[in-house]
Image: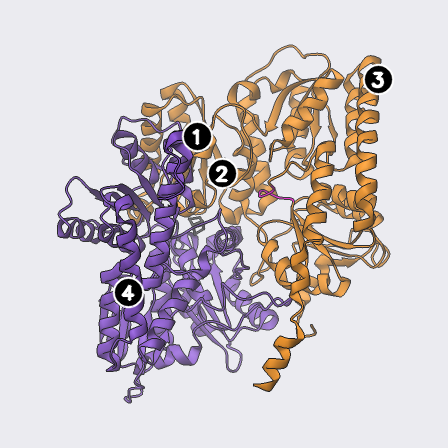
Chain colours: A orange, B purple
Amino acid sequence: MSELKILEERKSFIQYGKNQSDGCGSLQCDSDSLSGAVSQRACVYCGARVVLNPITDAFHIVHGPIGCASYTWDIRGSLSSGSELFRNSFSTDLSEQDVVFGGEKKLGKAIEELVAKETPKVIFVYATCIVGVIGDDVDAVCKEAEAKYGIRVIPVKSPGFSGNKSYGYRMACDAIMTLIRPHTGPKKARSVNILGDFNLAGEMWIIQNYMKEIGIEVVSTITGDASYESLIKAPTASLNLVQCAGSMTYLAKQMESEMNIPFVKVSFFGIEDTSASILRVAEAVGTQENVNRAKALIRREEAKLKGFLESRIPRLTGKRAAIYVGGGFKAISLIRQFNAMGIKTVVVGTQTGKPEDYEIIGTLVDDDAVILDDANPTELELFMREKGADILVGGVKERPLAYKLGVAFCDHNHERKHALAGYEGVINFTNEINSSMNSPVWQYLQVPEFLTEEGEHE
Amino acid sequence: MLNLTPKEIADRKALTINPCKTCQPVGALYCALGVHKCMPHSHGSQGCVSYHRTFLTRHFKEPAIASTSSFTEGASVFGGGSNLKTGMKNVFDIYNPDIIAVHTTCLSETIGDDVGSYIMDFDMPEGKLAVHTNTPSYVGSHVTGFYNMMSGFIKYLAESTGTKNGKVGIFPGFVNPGDIRELKRLAGLMEMPYIMFPDQSGVMDSPMTGNYEMYPKGGTTIEEITALGDAKHVLALGMFTSTEPANVLDRKCKVPYDVLPLPMGIEGTDELLMKMAQLSGTEIPQALEDERGQLVDVMLDAHFYHHGKKVAIFGDPDTVLGLTALVLEMGMIPKYVVTGTPGEGFEIKAKEMFAKFGMEGCKAKAAADLFDLHQWIKNESVDLLIGSSYGKQIAKAEEIPFVRAGFPVLDRYAHSYFPIVGYKGALRLVELITNALLDHFDRTCADEDVDVVL
Ligand code: SF4
């Protein structure tokens, strides 16, 4: 496909393997999309919203025109063991009048209407693109409401233009800090918070079960299946586990400096990372007893998986994978999982990867693998073709692109329907990869001769 | 789920809960995808277009392309002129469309960007074009954005040479590719030369070839949009979607037009075909007469299951009114008829339809949300719910059979390939509705009532 062109300005966002550049220092990342790009990248509001949305009993009021609220209504497959409140959409639906005269009054009224109807413990108010521009003082409205109703009303400043999705993650972390800061208590021994798992398809529950089995208490889950009551206990944990580093390292650092809670990065994707993470937690906050239990769990689960993987690997070995996901850490886990399946990762892209992530990625893939920051469809297409990818792991926007190219697909984003975390996740992930790659439908892609011949005779 | 919704209805003025609309730009984007070799361009923050593309991809299960000006803090203060120009240059350089269709967002509107003059100042590559429209997200809904983009294309491109080309412009409204294909089939059977605008068929339902085409075969061509200026007539389908662009074309190029309802149900389709017959001077062919007869036949066969059943319908105004017309013809009661798109005309129109069929106690509301609808249902339930996927939660909570129609349908496949317009579309809806009612009965009835013959 020689007509596919890569923008000159984009070239610094692309790198071949580890050897062709001096580490990742040269790969430009963590900046804004280029004007005119068909970028897959989302905005500050999106970042903030996806992090806070799973808090199940919170009210999320989107202050702005209706769009931002509509697009984020119940879009994340975060599961709840309690309230389903978060699956509703609340908005001030600003109209032209409000834009001219300001939306503060409407926001105040909206909160009043909500409080009259419900008994919220916490309301998050998202200030989207135009709120600052029309001069609304959202902080003041929230403060006033907090005083008036005696509940937490926390502003989340997330105008789309103020940065990228990573910045939105930070705004969400700030909001969480605002929520938990006033709450203290004695530290509990052998306890952790889990940061950066959103309980998609119940993944948080899988991790919680592991913790339970090895005798470690989970105080708060941030934010998958979280509630107001569970969140405010977070300051009493003795360790933070950071699963989605891209979104939560910032919060972990703040909790470390203000609340004296150290953190470790973990990943529960793939056997290697899951086992390492479980052991790491036991060693960090547990006794020898906890470590022993962790080792027993790991032995048992790995043994269970061995037979399964051996039966699947023959169908997968030698295939080539392309990865396009949000965070760098997830990409790393995925590459390791593919390596374990005998699948070579030939293209890796992330939306919010950090230089240190790209450095690790560079060491995990072959020298000719392509590493991209903030890829767009054209680049994905170009490199998937060039590298002959058999499967793409990505999000909703990439799915139809992959199919159009005749490439199998696995959703590792909001739309995943099966848990991909933990040992169970390895089975689901392998099955998904296998069923997409080995579907009989692919063979019909080839247009049969009787059709093309007929075409020629016409 | 959604057990949050209380029965008691309290007045809400400031708070929208569970919206039944979204913002203008996504409508503009969808419209622009119906133009051949066009790159829709969103002049705003990078996030907007990411949402809009996701929204369309989830509905069509197809790639939906669009570029963005990618506003930064600076652009929000000093204006987005340079972002737009760089953006357009990059789009032409790398994606090479024939035309860029720019729409604004709430942000670029609020800071007052003059997109028209930015485009005028732009150093346009040879043979390339750009058009724009204003789509402030705080006015109207996605439907508004859709027709604003149509108007934008017409204002820039339609030209009258003084000689009519004998074609009829068809403005299909905010519908699926399956509907557009059906409208084209009808026009073909009626031997009426036409220009379909916009035309997402062949774009948002393009076949699997193993190649990704950024610009698939379908879409109204630029030449066709230009030629709309010489059309002898325009059929503007859906009064809330197509009136404005028809009006713009008439003012610019003196093309007379008729506004018709979306051709849904028997009478709606009759009306369209009679107009087509008039314009083409041909008689309605036997094939279509047969289709109508088949539809009536099926409606009669199953009328027992429909008659007197209460239905709640929500979605975009023209689609909702079309569905209302059909269920009235089927003998059902359109108990609640709701759109999120603001505008008084909707309620008036709906009430006229209720009156025509002697319906009492039916409610219609524009600028409503699904919380309203759910509350109404809690107070007096219905037998069937028709609307977008967002009705799923209500249907589950209240155990109501549910038929998906309109935008967006995010949780089912292949729906966008089939029509809901024309006799064929009505037949399909009748099947969907009957199946939903009967499936529900089969699932919930007592064992002794299970019957293989219904
Ligand atoms: S910022 Fe405005 S234009 Fe963009 S998605 Fe939100 S409401 Fe729509």
Q: Chain of mark 2?
A: A
Give the residue number, with chain letter if any, for mark 1.
B1
Q: Nearer the viewer, mark 1 or mark 4?
A: 4
Q: Position of residue A284 (x, y in %)?
A: 79, 21
Crowding at dot 3, Cα within 10 Å, few <14 / some 14-19 / many 20+, comes out as some
Give the residue number, with chain letter if any, for mark 4.
B292
Q: Which quadrant: the N terminus of chain A?
A: bottom right
Q: Position of residue B49 (x, y in %)?
A: 50, 55
Q: What kind of residue is marked 1?
A: Met
Q: Determine whether, in the image, residue B379 is placed left or right of residue A297.
A: left
Q: Residue A357: tell me if it is visible.
A: yes
Q: CA distance from mark 3 to mark 2?
A: 45 Å
Give the residue number, with chain letter if any, for mark 2.
A157
Disc 1 within 8 angstroms of ligand 1 (CB): no
Q: Nearer the viewer, mark 1 or mark 3?
A: 1
Q: Position of residue B356 (x, y in %)?
A: 14, 52
Taking the spot 35% from the left edge, 47% from the top edge, the residue there is B434
Which residues lie in the magenta part?
Answer: A412-416
Disc 4 within 8 angstroms of ligand 1 (CB): no
Q: What kind of residue is marked 2?
A: Lys
